[in-house]
Structures are given as C-alpha cells and as structure tokens.
Image (cartoon, grey):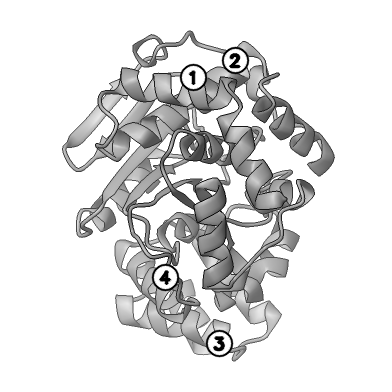
Amino acid sequence: MKQILHYLFNHHTLTKSEAKSILTEIAQNKFNDSEITAFITIFMMRSITLNELEGFREALLQMALPVDLGTDDLVDIVGTGGDGKNTFNISTLAAFIVAGAGQKVAKQGNYAASSVSGSSNVLEHCGYRFKTSEKELRDDLEKGNICFLHAPLFHPALKKVAPLRKNLGLKTFFNLLGPLVNPARPKHTLIGVANLEIARLYQYLLQKQDNHTMLVHALDGYDEISLTQDTKIFDKNGEYIYSAEELGFKNISEDHIYGGETKEEAAAIFLNILDGKGTLEQNAVVLANAAMALYNTKKYGDYQNCFELAKKSLLEGKAKDCLNKITA
C-alpha cells in the first residue's frame, strides 16, 4: 500500500484495473486501518476519475453476494448521500410509496456514515430484520412488493471500511459507489446526486448500461428532488430542469425537510409520514421523488399519472401496508 499511496500523493491516478485490484485487496484484509484511511482520504482531496470509479464498481459487484430475485423489473431509489443537508429519509419513503403503487422494489441501503440516520438505521428501528437469503428476500418481494438489501451483508469491502467511514464522518468515494452496486441489478434506478460534477461522472458511466437510470439533483445541493430549488434531471435522452411548479408543487424551505437530531427522531418522522400524518411539505417531497421513480420505468404513463399513483399509495395507506408486511 505504501507504494500505491506514494504514487497517488504524486498526483497520479489509477487505471480501471488498478482500482479494481486495490479494492479487492482491501476486502481481503491485506491492509491495516491506517493505510485504508489514508487511501480513502486521497479521494476526499481530489475528484475520482471515471476509470477509478469503474474499477471500484467492478470490484464490488464481482465480490458481492449474488442475489437472484427472479426478475430485474425492479426499482431502486437511492442517493449518494454526503450532501450535508440532514433531511429525513426521503428516498426510503419514496421506495415504499413506489411499492404501494404496485411496482416491485429492491432497495439497497446502509447505516448512516455522514448523516444522522441512513435507510438501514430507520428500517432496523421499525423492526425490519436484515436478510441475505434469496428465499426470504423473494418472500418479502412477494408479500410487500419490496425487499431491502443491507449493503455490508452483500459487499465485504463495505463491511470492512464501515467503521473507518463512520469515524471519519465525512463523504467518501464509497458514497459514490453505493448507488451503482445494488446486487439485485434493478432495471430502473433513480439516483440522487449531491453535485453536478458527480452527475457528469455518473452520466458517462451509465451511458454504457442497458437500463433505465435517471439522475436527479437539486440545484441548491440536495441529492434528491428537494423542492427547495429547481431540480436538474439527467437521463439517456438528455438533461432537463424542472421547477417545483412544473412538478406539481410549490417551493418549500429547508426546515420543512429537516431530518432530526437522533435516529429516534428520524424514525418518528419516517413513520409519521407513512401513517399519512406528514406535513404538506413532507408529503410533497416524497411524492415528487416517488412519482419520478415510477415515471422512469416507462410503465405507468406520464408524470401526472405517476404522481396520482404515488399519492394514492401514501394517503390510502398502501405504502404503510408494504412496511407492515415485511416487518410482521
């Protein structure tokens, strides 16, 4: 590792194969914690290259515990995290709304590394038991239209670096990898990105893939449709900017999507919204993200129709039913 670090400290970058090899060796415990932390820190001081991102991604997918859910007609809604905004669990709520609307979801998530509460934290608090068995995951998908994949159980490299990421408490390149390495390989993915530089990098990478991937970025720095500012959207057909009004809502202020100071507060907000007791602003944000995820599948008509499906899912309790069915 010393040679690698010296090479990178001298402003060199890794080839795709080098990046793949190093991340594989990290997962194989070939380096100590100090060496790994130094390696991670380098990518906090400069931008990751496309070759490095591709290599890291290939390594994680190659080492991942394989998952066959019997279909790839699945949705994932996920953000890079690390935007520093401390919102409530918008993408996880949107995933349950999508499931309640009739679309099967394979949601990958993790414990929070740089925020108060990640999707794994909130679902664990709600009584969900993490699973790796294909049969159990398929059962959840059958019962509740959604299954949850706790990333460290499927990615040995993520499990190895989790304590280091938590100790750093800052955004690392692993934030960028998470949305790209769902082992269920869903056909439809809505990815929230925290800045336009990341969006461009993802766009180059995802152009090579044969699936429906949409990138969303709020122009004031949120890694989701936040409705606090206009939203920039990228798909294979181009780039678009939507105002809150064009998405069917009004602009909201940042405090309306605040996520709380503790995991308990975050879980209470999560359940309150799923129970249909969220504020108009909280509901608006999760519905906007859920509707866009449904629209991205190209299966449910135009955005307005997708919004109506999402609204029924939340307000008629269908989304909450999905959670109840997989936590019973």
> Which mark lies nearer to you, 3 or 4?
4
Q: Which residue is mark 3?
A: 2
Say what secondary structure mark 4 lies in: loop
Q: In this rendering, does residue 112 appear at all?
A: no
Say what secondary structure mark 3 lies in: helix
Q: Which residue is mark 1?
A: 227
Type of the residue with mark 4: Asp
- Look at the picture and state if 122 lies above or below 97: below
Q: CA distance from mark 3 to mark 1?
A: 46 Å
| Quarter occupied by residue 68 | bottom left
Q: In this rendering, does residue 261 appear at all?
A: yes
Whole-percent x, y for residue 2 in the image: 55, 87
- Look at the picture and state if 41 lies above or below 78: below
Whether residue 317 sits left or right of residue 178 in the image: it is right
Type of the residue with mark 3: Lys
User: In terms of sequence position, does the residue under pointer 4 or pointer 1 come before the other?
Assistant: 4
| Quarter occupied by residue 27 | bottom right
Q: CA distance from mark 3 to mark 4?
A: 39 Å
Q: Are marks 2 and 1 in contact (CB under 8 Å)?
A: yes
Q: Which residue is mark 2?
A: 281
The residue under the point 40% across, 21% down is 307
Q: Determine which of the numbered discs, if any, sits on residue 68 in the image.
A: 4
Say what secondary structure mark 2 lies in: helix
- Look at the picture and state if 102 lies above or below 147: above
Q: CA distance from mark 4 to mark 1?
A: 36 Å
> Which mark lies nearer to you, 3 or 2?
2
> Which mark lies nearer to you, 4 or 1?
4
